[in-house]
Image (spheres, rainbow, N blue to C red):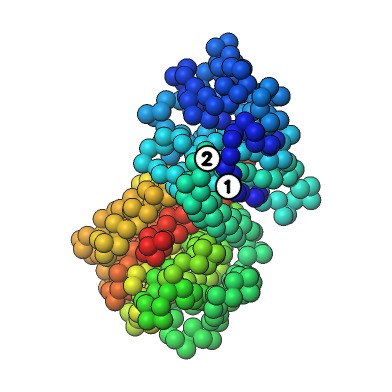
Amino acid sequence: MEFNVKHGTLETMKTGCVVVAINESGKLAGAAAELDRACGGQISLAVKHGDISGKPGQTLMLFGLPGISAQRVLLAGYGKDEELNDRSFRKLVQKVIAVLKDGGATDALFTFAALPVKQRDLYSRTRLLVETARESLYQFDQFKSKKATKPRLKKVLMWSADKSDADALTRGVAHGQAISDGTDLTRTLGNLPGNVCTPTFLAKEAKVLGKQHPELDIEILDEKDMKALGMGSLLSVSAGSAEPAKLIRFSYQGGKPKDQPHVLVGKGITFDTGGISLKPGAGMDEMKYDMCGAATVFGVLKAAVSMRLPINIVGLVAAAENMPSSTATKPGDIVTSMSGQTIEVLNTDAEGRLVLCDALTYAERFKPASVVDIATLTGACIVALGSHTTGLLGNNDELIGKLLDAGKQSDDRAWQLPLFDEYQEQLDSPFADIANIGGPKAGTITAACFLSRFTKAYPWAHLDIAGTAWISGGKEKGATGRPVPLLTQYLLNQAQV
């Protein structure tokens, strides 16, 4: 899909469809009023006759209006001005795209630049529109013998009457496209089946991304390398699988050589059976999504490099497959992490923290300005926050605040959970330095407590995306690409661009 910016007299714009938003006040304003004057009141007549009132979700397609060069005019209701927020704006865009992608127009001109979306300037409105449109147009059909019908809509233009808006519109379109490209990559990697998307496959895809973007330096550590580093915790997870683990490093030097990098660490369990602590069979197919933290690192790096952010970034992906076999780690086994801390593995299904802890220790060598790990870590997070909000915990209030702000800015929200010392006691083990689970209470928090034992050297935050990384069941089932927008916004803010 091509997105671009257009200025000029609206009624003279030659396009397959002009898209105009109207509110339910009954009074046309902005682009709607301008087009209404050009066509001799045909739009206001449609409103007067009740064909459309401006309520959310309503649309009306008008053809061949006199005095207007566009072949079609699509009217879309958005409700009351004072109620137009991120959610209702997204629904407006989703409805418009649903109409257009199955219609006859191959290009469309959006006139949404002046819509009064709460706490949104022109740049962020434009970016949100592009991201929402791209999200609505995403398709994953590479394993279907009969491919999905491609939308006829190929080109979207953002219109504004004021040429002074050009910079904000252009920047919003460019950033929205880059973030959407990253999100699409994350979604596609997440949607791939476990027999295709293995740790070795992710390593190969990292090299592909490196060839596409020469600014990225890629290093792949195999199990021999990890063993030499003392990563006994990570390797304990892959011990039962025929698929070897991989530790993937991305490095992007967009800033000054001496600038401390921001490090992203992704959990990459390409399939999680639970190991010896076997999961129930129902819904186990969705455990292919247990590498969505890793996929997020891919997506954020792609977006950041595409935008040429003046910042240094390191991405780490701890990739392994968790399988039951005669060589698998057993409940009660004790392993030694790269940090030297010993871990009693009480439940092999709490494996994400076992791969992350060694990757977090490895992150120390980069002397990071911040470290954020991303993981589909706990079902408890879904119980606590559902599927709308990402769980956020960490050891640095300033970093936590920056991530919360980035979530609001990107409409990819997170919510902070406590990380009090009292919870740490649940991880006590009589046989090792730490147990890998803390019992049935506060599972999301104790999982973060476990990770905090390995992050004392730098500012660290943990994003639990178990509820937000994918949609379960039904025809909408699939990876969401979250939290690529949140983390890209965080990096944009750190780069101050």
Q: Residue at x 59, y 19 (%)?
A: 43
Side of 294 relative to 61 (left or right): left
The quadrant in which residue 159 appears is top right
- Mark 2: amino acid: Ser
CB atoms of marks 2 and 1 within 8 Å: yes
Q: Position of residue 465 (x, y in %)?
A: 44, 55
Q: Which one is nearer the viewer's eye here, 226 or 233?
A: 226
* Residue 184 in picture, x, y percent from top left: 59, 55
Vertical comparison of 388 with 494: above or below: above
109 left or right of 383? Answer: right
x 58%, y 26%: residue: 35
Residue 194 at least partly seen = yes
- The image quadrant where one finds the C terminus is bottom left
- Residue at the image position 56 percent from the left and 68 percent from the top: 321
Name the secondary structure under disc 2: loop
The foreground one among 304 and 483 is 304
**Residue placed furthest toward the left:** 422
Quadrant position of residue 106? top right
Residue at which label 2 appears: 160
Residue 279 lies, with reference to residue 152, above or below; the image says: below
Front residue of 379 and 492:
492
Q: Residues within 10 Å of mark 2 (few under 14, many from 20)?
A: many
- The residue identified by callout 1 is 5
As drawn, which residue projects farthest toward the right? 145
